[in-house]
C-alpha cells in the first residue's frame, strides 16, 4: 500500500539518496582543485534536506510503513534531523582536511552512513534494524581507514572493522534467537510474544546480553569500548568527530526504542544491570581519560564517559529519562563536534595533536581558544553551555527513578571530568610556546571552519540557555515511546 | 510591567563581556573603558535598587518572572528581599572598584593592574560578576544553580592565567574542585527536594517560594540538610572545608581576590541560607549545633592562623575564614539577632576584605613583595592606601563607629542567647584579630622603609584612590548610620524566622 505517508516516512532518506546521486554525477566533472567544493554541496544539500523534511515531512500520529519495517514518529524524526545536522557539520569539516577534503568518495561514504543512521532511528523491525546498522557501519569502517598511507589510520579502519563485525555477529545471533522465541521480528509485535511467563529468565537475559553487545559497541559503553580510543586517534579527525557524535547517538536511538518498545517487561529487571554498566562506564571512562596525553584519545575516553552519563537517563526508564537522554545527546552532539572541530582546525595548521602542543593557543588565535573553552566547559557540565543543562536533566531523571547512588557516581565522575577538561584549558590559556613567540605562529581558520565552529558554538550556548524548545522536542520524541 | 531592573543588572556584565571580547585585542584602553562603563552602570542600578526597596512592604520586590521551561517548572524568577538587596549592592561596589584597581599603570616599572590580555581578563571577570548577581536575585533553584556554576568556573581561568606565578596552577585547580564538589553535592540534594516536593504536593517546580511550602518531613530534612547546606557553605569557607580559600586568595590577581573574598564567599553563605536554612528549616534546627561548632572553630582558628602568617595575603585570607565563620555563626543561631548580624556582616566583610586585598595588591605591584617583615614605611609613600588599610583594620576589629561593629555585635548577642559559652570562646578572635591587624599596620605602614624598597616604590594611581575612598565611605557610613542597612536586613530576617516557625 503506497500512500503519501509511506513516502513521507522515508523522505529524509530519499533526499539523502538524491543528494548522493547528485554528487556522484557532478563531482567527476570538477577539476581537481574544485573537488573540495563537494563539501559545500554536501552540507548545503543536507541542510536543505533538513529544511524540506521539517516543512513537508513532519510526523503526525505514529504510524508504521513498509510492511511494518519503518516507524514514522517523532523519535525517529528528531534523531534524523540531528544526524543530518551532524553530517552537514562533518562535511564542512572534511573540506580542508588535506587527506580527504578533495576526495568525492569521502562525502559519498558519509552520506551512505547517514542514510543508515536515519534508518536505524526509524527501524521497527529487527531485520531492517540490522541492515540499517550495517549500512551505517561499513562506510564508517572505510572512512576510518581512509588515509591509506597513514599506518594509524589503516590500523584504525581495520580494528574498527574487526571489532564491529564481531559485535554485529553477536547482535545478529541475539536477533535470530528473538525470532526463534517469538516468531516475529517486528518490534511492535514482540511485546506480546516475548513474554516473561513463557520463557526462562536465563534465556531472556542471554538474548538481551547478545543484543547489548552490538549496541554497546555502537555507543561505546564499557566493556565494549576498546575500539574507541585507537579508532578515534587513528581515523581522520572529522571522522572521529562524526563517530563520537552521530554514530553514538544512533546507537542510543536504537537502544531506547528496542528496550522501551520491544522488551518493556524485562526492562525493569534489566535496569539494575544497566545501571551498573552506566556506573562502570562513567568511572572507567573518566579514570582512563585522566592519563591521556593525546587530545583525540582524551576526547575518545571522555566520549565513553559521556555514554555513561546518558545511560543514567535510559536506566531511569521514565518519560523524563528518555527525554533527558535525547536532550543530552543533542547537546553532546553539538559540543563534541565543536571540540573535534577546534582540534581539527588547530592540528591542520600545526600538524600535531598532543595536549602539550596546545600551549599558547589562546595567543595564537583567541577566538579558537574561546570556542575550545566553550566546548570543554560544556563537556565538563558548566553553564551557560548545553552540557550543564543536559547533565542536570539526566541527574534529575535518575533521582526521580530512585537511583540516587547512580547520580552520586555521576557527580563524582563529573568532578573528575572538570579536572581533566580544565587541565587542557590550562595549556591553552596559561602555558606558552617554547620561545614565547606566539604572534609569529598564528592559527588561521579557513572559511568552512569559521562557519562550522561559529554555528556549533552558538548552538552550544543556545541549547544551554534557551533550553525550552529543545526540551519540548526531546519530550515530543520521548512521548512516542509511551 | 515595571522596568526589569534586576535582569538588567544581572545581564549587564554578561553583555559587556561579549562587547569586550568583540574589541580588537590591542585596544587595551577601550577595553578598560567599556568595562568601567558597564561596572558603573551596574553600580548605579544596584544603588537605585537598594534605596528604592520598600522596607515597610518588605518581602520580595522588583519581582520578575518569565516561564523558562514550564514542563519542569523552571522559570527565570528574580526578586530581592532584605537579605539579598545589600548583597546586590555589594557586588556592584566590588565590581566597580575591581575594575578601577585593575586598570593599573602601564609604566613598566610599576606594572600594576592587569597588563597581560586585559580583554580576556575583563570578559571572564564580568561573566563571573553576572553569575554572582544572578545567584543573589534568583528565586528559582534551577537558575540559582545555573548562575552559581557560572560564578565558579571563570575563577579557574582568572587565577590560573593572571595569578601569582608560584601557586596559581595548584590553587586554581584546588579551588575549582572544592567548589565544584560542594555545588554538585548540593545539586543532588536539590534534585531530591524537587521530587519529594512533587510527591508531597503534586507541584513540579524549582520555584523556591513554592518549595517553602513543600512540607518536607522532619526525617527528610534531617538527612538532606547537611549535604545541601555544607555543599554551599564550602564556598562560604566553612571550617573544615575552608582550605581552598586562603590558597585561592593568595594566588588570585588583586581584582579577583577582591571578588573572591568580597563577594564569592558571600555567595556560599547566602545560598546555604536560602536553600539550606530557608527550605529545610527543621533540618537547620536539628543540625544548628554542628554548624555552630564548625563556625566557632573557624572564627578562632582562622584568626589564630592569620596571626602567625607573614604573607599579607595569607593573613587576610585566613582573616576571611575567621570573619566568614562569624557569618556562619550568626546563621547557626537561627534567631533574630544572629541572622541580622550575619546579613550585615556579609556586606561589611565584603567591603572590608575587598579593601584589604586592593591595598595589598597595590603594595605588591609596587614593592614586589607581600612578606610583612620585608615591608615598611608605606604610609609615607602611599598615604591614601595606608589610611584605607587602617580604616579596614578598624572594621575588622569590630570598632564602634565602623561597619564591623554594627555586624558583629548582634552576632555575639545572638550567640549568647543560644550558647553563651560559644560566644565567649568566639570572642577570643576579636583580641587575636586586633593583634594581627595592629602588628601589620605598624610594620607595613609605619616602620622604617627598608633599604631595598627605597627609590623605586611609587604612589598609587588616581583610580586606585577612588576605589579606596568608595570602599571607606561605605564602611564608615554604615558604621555611623546603621539604620541605612540594619532595618532592611531585619525585614529579610523576619521572613526567615517565619519559615523557622517563629523560633
Image (cartoon, rainbow, N blue to C red):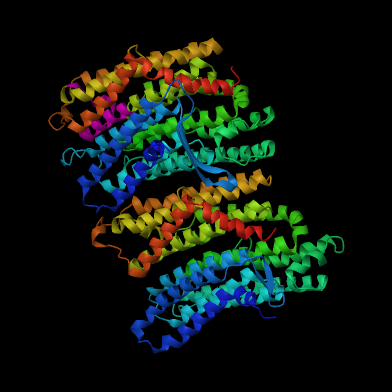
Please identify the quadrant where the C terminus of chain A is shown. Answer: bottom right
Q: Which of B30 and B288 is in front in this view?
A: B30
**Residue A476 forms part of the magenta stretch:** no
Q: Where is residue B377 in the image (x, y as percent from the top left)?
A: 19, 22
Q: Residue at x 41, y 28 (%)?
A: B85
Q: Residue furthest bottom?
A: A29
Residue A221 visible in image:
yes
User: Does residue A141 appear in this view?
Assistant: no
Q: Is residue B83 above or below residue B425?
A: below
Q: Quadrant of residue B246?
A: top left
Q: Image height check: is A143 above or below A204?
A: below
Q: Give the range drawn in magenta.
A: B354-379
Q: Residue furthest left?
A: B455
- Residue A362 at x, y percent in the picture: 32, 55
Displayed quadrant of residue A147:
bottom left
Q: Is residue A452 left or right of residue B35?
A: right
Q: In this view, does B196 lie to the left or right of B278?
A: right
Residue that sits furthest to the right in the current view: A198
Q: Looking at this view, is A473 or A122 the one in front?
A: A473
Question: Is-magenta flag for residue B375?
Answer: yes
Give the camera-side residue of A262 and A377.
A262
Quarter of the figure that contains the N terminus of chain A: bottom right
A47 vs B407: above or below:
below
Residue A363 x/y as whole percent = 29, 55
Residue at the spot 58% in from the left edge and 72% down from the top edge? A118
At which x and y percent is residue A126?
Answer: 71, 73
Prevailing secondary structure class for the magenta stretch in the rendered image: helix
Amino acid at each position: 500500500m503506497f500512500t503519501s505517508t509511506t513516502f513521507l516516512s522515508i523522505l529524509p532518506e530519499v533526499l539523502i539518496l538524491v543528494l548522493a546521486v547528485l554528487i556522484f554525477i557532478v563531482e567527476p566533472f570538477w577539476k581537481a582543485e574544485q573537488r573540495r567544493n563537494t563539501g559545500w554541496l554536501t552540507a548545503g544539500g543536507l541542510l536543505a534536506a533538513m529544511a524540506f523534511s521539517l516543512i513537508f515531512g513532519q510526523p503526525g500520529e505514529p504510524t508504521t510503513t513498509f510492511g511494518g519495517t519503518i516507524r514514522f514518529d517523532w523519535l525517529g524524526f528528531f534523531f534524523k534531523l540531528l544526524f543530518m545536522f551532524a553530517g552537514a557539520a562533518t562535511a564542512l569539516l572534511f573540506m580542508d582536511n588535506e587527506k580527504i577534503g578533495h576526495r568525492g568518495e569521502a562525502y559519498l561514504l558519509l552520506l551512505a552512513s547517514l542514510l543508515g543512521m536515519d534508518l536505524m532511528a526509524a527501524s521497527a523491525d529487527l531485520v531492517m534494524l540490522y541492515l540499517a546498522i550495517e549500512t551505517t557501519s561499513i562506510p564508517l569502517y572505510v572512512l576510518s581507514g581512509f588515509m591509506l598511507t597513514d599506518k594509524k589510520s589503516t590500523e584504525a579502519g581495520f580494528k574498527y572493522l574487526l571489532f564491529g563485525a564481531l559485535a554485529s555477529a553477536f547482535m545478529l545471533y541475539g536477533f535470530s534467537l528473538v525470532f526463534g522465541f517469538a516468531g516475529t521480528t517486528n518490534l511492535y509485535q514482540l511485546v506480546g510474544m516475548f513474554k516473561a511467563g513463557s520463557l526462562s529468565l536465563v534465556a531472556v537475559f542471554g538474548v538481551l546480553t547478545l543484543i547489548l553487545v552490538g549496541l554497546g559497541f555502537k555507543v561505546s559503553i564499557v566493556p565494549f569500548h576498546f575500539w574507541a580510543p585507537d579508532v578515534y586517534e587513528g581515523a581522520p579527525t572529522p571522522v572521529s568527530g562524526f563517530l563520537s557524535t552521530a554514530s553514538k547517538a544512533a546507537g542510543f536511538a536504537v537502544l531506547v526504542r528496542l528496550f522501551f518498545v520491544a522488551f518493556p517487561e524485562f526492562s525493569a529487571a534489566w535496569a539494575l544491570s544497566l545501571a551498573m554498566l552506566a556506573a562502570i562506564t562513567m568511572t572507567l571512562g573518566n579514570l582512563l581519560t585522566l592519563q591521556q596525553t593525546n587530545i583525540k584519545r582524551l576526547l575518545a575516553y571522555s566520549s565513553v564517559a559521556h555514554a555513561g552519563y546518558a545511560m543514567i537517563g535510559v536506566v531511569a526508564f521514565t518519560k523524563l529519562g528518555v527525554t533527558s537522554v535525547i536532550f543530552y545527546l543533542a547537546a553532546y552532539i553539538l559540543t563534541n563536534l565543536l571540540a573535534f572541530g577546534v582540534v581539527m582546525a588547530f592540528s591542520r595548521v600545526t600538524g600535531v595533536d598532543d595536549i602539550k602542543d596546545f600551549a599558547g593557543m589562546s595567543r595564537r588565535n583567541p577566538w579558537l581558544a574561546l570556542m575550545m573553552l566553550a566546548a570543554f566547559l560544556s563537556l565538563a557540565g558548566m553553564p551557560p553551555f548545553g552540557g550543564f543543562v543536559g547533565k542536570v536533566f539526566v541527574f534529575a531523571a535518575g533521582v526521580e527513578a530512585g537511583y540516587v547512588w547512580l547520580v552520586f557516581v555521576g557527580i563524582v565522575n563529573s568532578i573528575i571530568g572538570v579536572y581533566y577538561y580544565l587541565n587542557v584549558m590550562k595549556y591553552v590559556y596559561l602555558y606558552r610556546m617554547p620561545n614565547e613567540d606566539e604572534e609569529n605562529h598564528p592559527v588561521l581558520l579557513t572559511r568552512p571552519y569559521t562557519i562550522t565552529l561559529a554555528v556549533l558554538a552558538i548552538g552550544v550556548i543556545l541549547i544551554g540557555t534557551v533550553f525550552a524548545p529543545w526540551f519540548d522536542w526531546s519530550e515530543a520524541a520521548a512521548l512516542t515511546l509511551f | 510591567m515595571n522596568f526589569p531592573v534586576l535582569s538588567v543588572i544581572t545581564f549587564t556584565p554578561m553583555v559587556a563581556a561579549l562587547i569586550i571580547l568583540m574589541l580588537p585585542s590591542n585596544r587595551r584602553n577601550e577595553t578598560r573603558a567599556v568595562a568601567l562603563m558597564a561596572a558603573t552602570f551596574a553600580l548605579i542600578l544596584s544603588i537605585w535598587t537598594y534605596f528604592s526597596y520598600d522596607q515597610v512592604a518588605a518581602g520580595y520586590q522588583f519581582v520578575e518572572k518569565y516561564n523558562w521551561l514550564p514542563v519542569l517548572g523552571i522559570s527565570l524568577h528574580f526578586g530581592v528581599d532584605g537579605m539579598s538587596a545589600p548583597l546586590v549592592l555589594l557586588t556592584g561596589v566590588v565590581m566597580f572598584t575591581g575594575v578601577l584597581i585593575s586598570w593599573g599603570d602601564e609604566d613598566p616599572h610599576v606594572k600594576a593592574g592587569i597588563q597581560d590580555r586585559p580583554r580576556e581578563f575583563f570578559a571572564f571577570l564580568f561573566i563571573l560578576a553576572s553569575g554572582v548577581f544572578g545567584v543573589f536575585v534568583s528565586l528559582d533553584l534551577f537558575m540559582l544553580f545555573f548562575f552559581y556554576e557560572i560564578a565558579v568556573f571563570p575563577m579557574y581561568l582568572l587565577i590560573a592565567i593572571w595569578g601569582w606565578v608560584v601557586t596559581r596552577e595548584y590553587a586554581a585547580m584546588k579551588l575549582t574542585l572544592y567548589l565544584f564538589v560542594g555545588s554538585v553535592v548540593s545539586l543532588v540534594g536539590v534534585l531530591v527536594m524537587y521530587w519529594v516536593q512533587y510527591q508531597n504536593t503534586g507541584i513540579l517546580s524549582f520555584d523556591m517560594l513554592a518549595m517553602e511550602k513543600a512540607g518536607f518531613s522532619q526525617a527528610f530534612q534531617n538527612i538532606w540538610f547537611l549535604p545541601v547546606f555544607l555543599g554551599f557553605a564550602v564556598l562560604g569557607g566553612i571550617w573544615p572545608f575552608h582550605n581552598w580559600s586562603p590558597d585561592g586568595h593568595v594566588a588570585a590577581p588583586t581584582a579577583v581576590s577582591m571578588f573572591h573574598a568580597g563577594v564569592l564567599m558571600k555567595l556560599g553563605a547566602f545560598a546555604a541560607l536560602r536553600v539550606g536554612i530557608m527550605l529545610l528549616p527543621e533540618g537547620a534546627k536539628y543540625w544548628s549545633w554542628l554548624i555552630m561548632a564548625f563556625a566557632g572553630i573557624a572564627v578562632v582558628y582562622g584568626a589564630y592562623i592569620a596571626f602567625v602568617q607573614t604573607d599579607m595575603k595569607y593573613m587576610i585570607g585566613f582573616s576571611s575564614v575567621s570573619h566568614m565563620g562569624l557569618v556562619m555563626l550568626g546563621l547557626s543561631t537561627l534567631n533574630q539577632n544572629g541572622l541580622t548580624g550575619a546579613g550585615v556582616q556579609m556586606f561589611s566583610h565584603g567591603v572590608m576584605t575587598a579593601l584589604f586585598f586592593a591595598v595589598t595588591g597595590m603594595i605588591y605591584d609596587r614593592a614586589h613583595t607581600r612578606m610583612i617583615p620585608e615591608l615598611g614605611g608605606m604610609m609615607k609613600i602611599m598615604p591614601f592606601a595606608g589610611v584605607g588599610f587602617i580604616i579596614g583594620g578598624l572594621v575588622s576589629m569590630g570598632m564602634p563607629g565602623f561597619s564591623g561593629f554594627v555586624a558583629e555585635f548582634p552576632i555575639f548577642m545572638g550567640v549568647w542567647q543560644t550558647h553563651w559559652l560559644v560566644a565567649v570562646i568566639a570572642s577570643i578572635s576579636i583580641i587575636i584579630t586586633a593583634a594581627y591587624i595592629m602588628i601589620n599596620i605598624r610594620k607595613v605602614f609605619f616602620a622604617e622603609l627598608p633599604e631595598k624598597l627605597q627609590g623605586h616604590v611609587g604612589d598609587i594611581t588616581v583610580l586606585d584612590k577612588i576605589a579606596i575612598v568608595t570602599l571607606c565611605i561605605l564602611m564608615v557610613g554604615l558604621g555611623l548610620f546603621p539604620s541605612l542597612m540594619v532595618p532592611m536586613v531585619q525585614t529579610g530576617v523576619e521572613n526567615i524566622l517565619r519559615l523557622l516557625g517563629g523560633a
